[in-house]
Image (cartoon, rainbow, N blue to C red):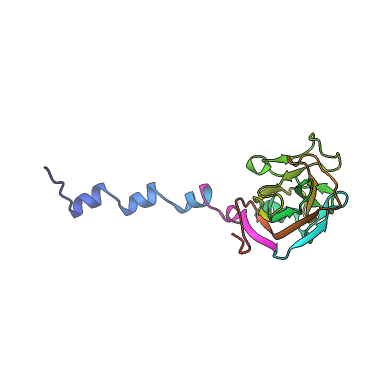
Amino acid sequence: MSLIKLNNRSLSNNAVTSDAIATDAVTTAKIANDAITHPKILSLGSMLYSWDASVASASGTGWRTMSSTVTLPSDSHLATYWANMMSATFFGYISSGSWYWTWRVYDVTANTVVQPISGPSSEQWYGAGSSQDAEDDGGFRFRGAVHQASQQPARVLDVTGRGGNGMTLEMRPSNGNGDVPQTNASQTLYADQIFWYAGAMTGMHNENGY
């Protein structure tokens, strides 16, 4: 068996040197231009607002407001620091009865539904062209146990051009797929631990925000 002898010369000439690190590996320019930048960090989903109190609303007719209004910053701030995205997640359920439920984020200033970005965040989203009422224009099917508090995956929403507008969380009874809204005054909708994030945030979160 042969042994490879290492000495100071072999290490300095053939292995890792200061020049190699500075010239060929990680540089300040590479970090700044190609990897992590300040706007990218900010767009990864910093905590914006949260409510840790249960909200209940009788189903009644139409969509029910389940949160206070969150006012977005200016369009330039949204574009520079949020990458024109915001995210929402919460725990929700509906009391026992005939129907399931669906949810959405609504722009109360523009009176329009806030659409999800394309990709995984639009999974189980039913928008224009579905069998929902024409004025509804979309909603997410619930996830988890329909009649027990279940955390909804964080959804990333497109807030381009919505600077200064107010956002609210809304819920409504629906069929099992979430694409046909229903009305049932005998059922009650519940929302709890509502989290809003600046930028893109995915996954599950609890009352501590993670």
* Percent of width and height locating residue 147: 72, 52
- Quadrant in the picture for the N terminus: top left
Considering depth in this image, is 207 or 147 the residue closer to the camera? 147
- Quadrant in the picture for the C terminus: bottom right
Residue range highlighted in magenta: 34-50
Considering depth in this image, is 139 or 86 the residue closer to the camera? 139
* Percent of width and height locating residue 111: 85, 49
Considering depth in this image, is 37 or 188 the residue closer to the camera? 188
Q: Residue furthest right?
A: 61
Q: Residue furthest top?
A: 129
Image height check: is 117 above or below 44? above
Q: Quadrant of residue 176?
A: top right
Does any portion of residue 35 appear in the rendered image?
Answer: yes
Residue at left offset 80%, top offset 47%: 173
Q: How many marks?
A: 0
Residue 6 vs residue 141: left or right? left
Residue 174 vs residue 193: left or right? right
* Percent of width and height locating residue 81: 65, 55
Query: Is residue 24 a member of the stretch shown in magenta?
Result: no
Residue at left offset 77%, top offset 39%: 179
Residue at left offset 75%, top offset 57%: 190
Considering depth in this image, is 67 or 91 the residue closer to the camera? 91
Image height check: is 9 above or below 137? below
Q: Residue furthest left?
A: 1
* Percent of width and height locating residue 93: 72, 53
Query: Is residue 45 a member of the stretch shown in magenta?
Result: yes
Q: Quadrant of residue 129?
A: top right
Does any portion of residue 73 appear in the rendered image?
Answer: no
Residue 159 vs residue 9: left or right? right
